Image (tube, coloured by chain):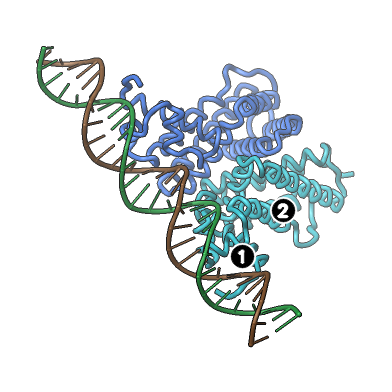
Chain colours: A blue, B cyan, C green, D brown
Amino acid sequence: MPRIPASERRVALVLAAVQVIGRGGVSAATTRAIVAEAGMSLASFHYAFTSHDELMAEVVRWVIAEERGAILPDGIEIGSLEVVARAGLQRYFDLLRADPEREQAVNELALYALRTPDMQHLARQQYEGYHALAAAALTFAAEHTGSEWTRPVDEVARLLVALTDGLTLAWLVDRDDTAARQLIDNAAALVAGMAHTR
Amino acid sequence: MPRIPASERRVALVLAAVQVIGRGGVSAATTRAIVAEAGMSLASFHYAFTSHDELMAEVVRWVIAEERGAILPDGIEIGSLEVVARAGLQRYFDLLRADPEREQAVNELALYALRTPDMQHLARQQYEGYHALAAAALTFAAEHTGSEWTRPVDEVARLLVALTDGLTLAWLVDRDDTAARQLIDNAAALVAGMAHTR
DNA sequence: CCTCCAGTGGGTCGATCGTCCCACTTGTTG
DNA sequence: CAACAAGTGGGACGATCGACCCACTGGAGG
């Protein structure tokens, strides 16, 4: 094992933990399983982190930060609000299909954080981030399509996040692509229906 | 400890397990914690169940069966489709607020079942049940309000389940009652908008 | 070249996990 | 009343968990 500074060990261990959780769930993320995934020794782990709990908190923070960037649109979308909304949902769904275990890990981590008193605020930050992100995207989309929301954008954002969560859970369970596609279409139409041309 | 036949022990242990999971999550549902909750000895556990896994499978089955009955409307609802839809969502939300830990336990159990190869079909049955239940309720509501769905009822049902799951997750995280109320109102209006008078 | 010290490897600790075993008690059946 | 089966209690098993300790190694700075 080459010499690696503790700071790099930390990110390597976090990545390994995400991998392990994706493969076997939060309960499989034992210290030993994580260091095995990272190809380290137990001592290296406790040199970089003081405890397993500290690592898990870092994992939650990491996942939150990474999730935020993944959903944002790559470029400027054009078309009606419904087209924009569907494109956004479709992009998220592609992400979900590309790495289902990862998204399931995110869900499990959210519930895990809710269970852990010291991490509840992380779960809340996670969802505040989702809602703020959705609100920003919705505002942007409305502006560039010359329309405005008939309900406060925060409400529309919360609806969109709820639909996304519901879509995720349902697809993770039954892996029904066509049903997911139809749900995306319906959701996009409904969300677009909550705006009118300015 | 009085003498109790194994069949009664089984249901008592399942109930105890649900209690423990609600309080501390799936990871807290150790054999010892469960028998302590039920006030039994370890031997009694392994007399009623051959293994901890067998108990967990029974717990998942139990929760599925119980969840199904809890959501059904008590009586005939009257009013517009939107009023009916909102009443249904509100009734579920009241259930959620009354026992949040229980609903979180249900979510964790669903993810747990997805992780356990021998239980994946149970998770699928759970969601098939949800979708069928929602479809039946929607059909019933449309009939009694003299309207019909503009999309296949299965699609509307899936949308409704997704909204319910999203509502649950969001509220479990931030416990924002007013936001949940607004989400319910919006969801009811949107679902009702997917039907027209016959 | 020598001296530190960040970083490593391996072994070990006590706690807790699921499971098992066996002696014991209690109700039932003939 | 005797015999048997159903159910109970407590202790013990090996495995695994998170945490820790200590002897060591190797590269960077004097």
Judging from the image, mark 1 belongs to the subunit labelled B
Q: Locate the C terminus of chain B and report the quarter of the image it occupies.
A: top right
* Residue A189 is at least partly visible in this image: no
Going from N to C along the chain, the mark reached first, 1 or 2, is 1
Question: Quadrant of the rendered structure where residue A89 is?
Answer: top right
Question: Quadrant of the rendered structure where residue D6 is?
Answer: bottom right
Task: Give the secondary structure at mark 1.
Answer: helix
Which residue appears at 51% of the width and 42% of the height? A27
> Percent x, y for residue A112?
50, 44
What's the mark number on residue B99? none
> Percent x, y for residue A45?
36, 33
What is the spatial separation of the Cα atoms under label 1 and label 2, in whole angstroms? 31 Å
> Percent x, y for residue D27?
25, 15
The residue closer to the viewer here, A102 or B85, is A102
Q: Is residue A93 left or right of residue A29?
A: right
Q: Which residue is mark 1?
A: B12
Judging from the image, mark 2 belongs to the subunit labelled B
CB within 8 Å, label 1 to label 2: no
Foreground tag (1 vs 2): 1
Which residue appears at 70% of the width and 46% of the height? B122
Q: Which amino acid, mark 1?
A: Ala
Q: Is residue B140 left or right of residue A12?
A: right
Task: Give the secondary structure at mark 2.
Answer: helix
Q: Which amino acid, mark 2?
A: Gly
Number of marks drawn:
2
Which residue appears at 57% of the width and 44% of the height? B170
Image: C20 above or below A63: below
Q: Which residue is mark 2?
A: B88
Which residue appears at 60% of the width and 62% of the height? B47
